[in-house]
Image (spheres, rainbow, N blue to C red):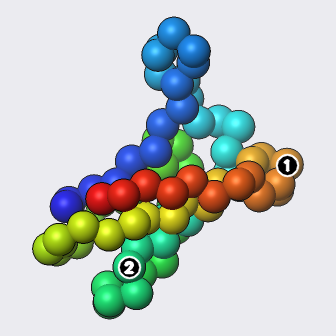
Amino acid sequence: MGNIRLFLLEENSNEQPGDVLSKIFYNLHTSFAKPALSVIKPPFTYTGNIEVWGEFRISINCYTTTKTELAAILHSQ
């Protein structure tokens, strides 16, 4: 896995800019050297050297521009 990206979709699947979000925290498995990754501007892509073996769950915390924390998104990788 070389990068992680979060994007917003409309009901008709058109991609929208993430300008309603201020920051995203990607929470990887605790076995990673750096399990918490933060990105503070759209398109909220983390590009780094992440070596993956097997499957694990990623928790994604999103914050709006009004500093509201939304419900965490869980994704199995």
Q: Name the disc covering residue 29, or none.
A: 2
The quadrant of the image that shows the N terminus is bottom left
Residue 66 visible somewhere in the drawing: yes
Lower position in the chain sequence, tag 1 or tag 2: 2
Q: For this rendering, which residue is in front, 10 or 64?
A: 10
Q: Is residue 77 above or below residue 6?
A: below
Q: For this rendering, which residue is in front, 15 or 48?
A: 15
Query: Residue 30 vs residue 54: left or right?
Result: right
Residue 75, how many percent across, how many down? 43, 55
SS category of the residue bearing label 1? loop
The quadrant of the image that shows the C terminus is bottom left
Seen at 52% across and 25% down, the residue is: 9
Residue 23 visible somewhere in the drawing: no
Mark in the foreground, 1 or 2: 2
Query: Residue 60 vs residue 5: left or right?
Result: right
Label 1 is placed on what type of residue? Thr
SS category of the residue bearing label 2? loop
Residue 38, how many percent across, how many down? 52, 67
Q: Name the disc covering residue 66, or none.
A: 1
Residue 24, how many percent across, how many down? 58, 58
Q: Callout 2: 10 Å neighbours few (<14), some, many (20+)? A: some
Q: Is residue 57 above or below residue 6?
A: below
Label 2 is placed on what type of residue? His
Seen at 57% across and 18% down, the residue is: 10
Q: CA distance from mark 1 to mark 2?
A: 29 Å
Seen at 32% across and 85% down, the residue is: 32
**Quarter of the image where one finds residue 49:** bottom left
